[in-house]
Image: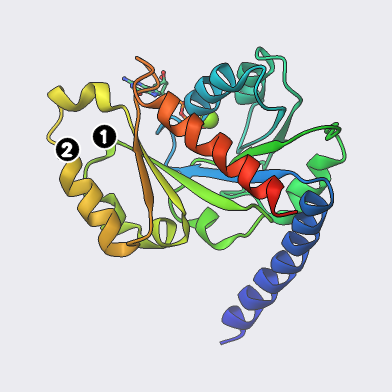
Amino acid sequence: MSVITIERKVLEKNDELARQNRTLFASRNIFSINIVSSPGAGKTSLVEKTLEQLKGKLNVAVVEGDVQTDFDAQRVAKYGVPVVQIVTNGGCHLEAKLVQDALQNLDLTNIQLLVIENVGNLVCPANYDLGEEMKVVVASTTEGDDKPLKYPGMFRNASVLIINKTDLLPYLPCKIDELKRNALSINPSLIIFETSCTTGYGVAEWCTWLTGKVFQHKGTK
Ligand SMILES: Nc1nc2c(ncn2[C@@H]2O[C@H](COP(=O)(O)OP(=O)(O)OP(=O)(O)O)[C@@H](O)[C@H]2O)c(=O)[nH]1
Ligand SMILES: [Mg+2]
């Protein structure tokens, strides 16, 4: 019973800090996304491909979250965008406070899109609001088509599903229609894109949609 109470308090505190992050983003007119997935589904690869496409079109900053190492921030830094790495030291998800602290080390001047890459984990990040506009869940074909049913929280809380590693479909038992059906049975309003970050397939469609969202958001402020 007391464990439940403590967990609720932790989440309430997190929600308050997420509200503060959201207020900061709104005051600066920044659209923010929180990319979540199991380890290795292709979050950083998607960030890299997205940065390639959006170069010269949108000002983007990136917050990287990992249990250990700054490998992902190093990959992103090659694209010449502001990036900061959060190392959770074992923590299995990002929290609003970690993002708030990281933002102190990020120059947000003229930034239109903030991309937060969460720790690879299909469970815990679902419960922690970071102040983002939307969660984007990446599910790769190598994980199988049943994951939305086994990890429903993440798919329920996401606005967008990116099915990545479609180039591997010929070699895998994963059925993409089944994966989509399962995801939509959990969350009928999911917007779905299919990508291969290896071949670049589908990345343009995702980036066009995302750019539209950023400008639509700007228009409402
Ligand atoms: N075949 C194939 N491989 C991919 C694709 N996208 C990513 N990969 C590979 O998958 C591996 C993991 O990719 P990352 O982008 O590091 O995945 P991640 O989700 O950021 O991983 P973590 O941050 O560790 O959770 C790398 O070896 C990528 O090259 C894809 O579309 N097709
Ligand atoms: Mg990564």
The residue lying at 26 percent from left, 34 percent from top is 141
Question: Dots 1 and 2: beta carbons under 8 Å?
Answer: yes
- In-front residue for pair 219/166: 219
The residue that mark 2 highlights is 174
Question: For mark 1, what is the residue?
Answer: 141
Q: CA distance from mark 1 to mark 2?
A: 6 Å
Q: Taking 170 as reference, is 120 left or right?
A: right
- Residue located 70% across and 54% down the image: 220
**Whole-percent x and y of residue 44?**
52, 27
Pointer 1 residue Cβ closer than 8 Å to ligand 1: no
The kind of residue tagged 1 is Thr
Which of the two discs, 1 and 2, labels the residue nearer the N terminus?
A: 1
Name the outermost residue toward the front.
Answer: 219
Question: Label 2 amino acid?
Answer: Cys
Question: What coloring was used for the rendering?
Answer: rainbow
Which sits in the foreground, 84 or 186? 186
Query: Does 132 appear above or below 169?
Result: below
User: Of helix, strand and loop, which one carries label 2?
Assistant: loop
Rendering coords of residue 71 (x, y %): 61, 21
Q: Residue at x 23, y 23 (%)?
A: 168
Circle 1 — which element? Answer: helix
Quadrant of the image occupied by residue 193: top left
